[in-house]
Amino acid sequence: MSFKICYGYFFVVSILLLTGCNFGTKTYSVTGTVNYDGQPLTKGMITLTPDGTNGNTGKSSMAEIRNGSFSIPKKYGVVSGAYRIFVESVESLGDDAGSKELFPTFSMDYHFQEGTNPPPLTINIPQNSKRK
């Protein structure tokens, strides 16, 4: 075997090891809305974390929530399986006053089905989640 062929094999194996060999893993885009106390959440952050206790070894995804909506493109999307979803938000206290949490981190479980793009998620955070 020539040096160039051996180097080529080494390069391909290295790439496979670095990427985790996930070439066959199908990811899905995720869109949705987040409401707090019946109104669209002005701004916040949503994080989707695979639930390893239920066998999901996918990657985490996150997006900014603006005017009640969020979108995670397929490139950064989810795989099928169980996830924990976390929503966080802060409210401004004025120009130089900083900000504070609007409510404690909200969490919920969700299972993304295999083989189809998930329908838009609707997350409703109740008023009793308000930070004291």
Image (cartoon, helix red, strand yellow):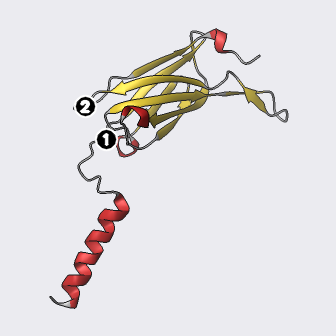
Q: Residue furthest left?
A: 1
Residue under label 2 = 114
Q: From the viewer's perspective, is 89 left or right of 11?
A: right
Which label sits in the foreground, 2 or 1?
A: 2
Residue at image x 58%, y 21%?
Answer: 41
Place of residue 127 in the rendered image (x, y in percent of width and height, measured from the top left):
64, 10
Q: Closest to the observer: 48 or 93?
A: 48
Place of residue 5 in the rendered image (x, y in percent of width and height, measured from the top left):
19, 83
Per the rendering, the mark at residue 105 is: none
Q: Which quadrant of the rendered structure holds the C terminus?
A: top right
Q: Which quadrant of the rendered structure holds the N terminus?
A: bottom left
- Secondary-structure class at tag 1: loop
- Secondary-structure class at tag 2: loop
Tell me if residue 132 can be seen: yes
Q: Residue 36: which quarter of the image?
A: top right
Task: Specify few, some or many for label 1: CA neighbours under 10 Å numbering under 14, 14-19, or 20 or more.
Answer: many
Gap between marks 2 and 1, in whole Å? Answer: 10 Å
Instruction: Work out whether 101 lies above or below 16.
Output: above
Place of residue 14 in the rendered image (x, y in percent of width and height, measured from the top left):
32, 70
Residue under label 1 = 27
**Mark 1 residue type:** Thr
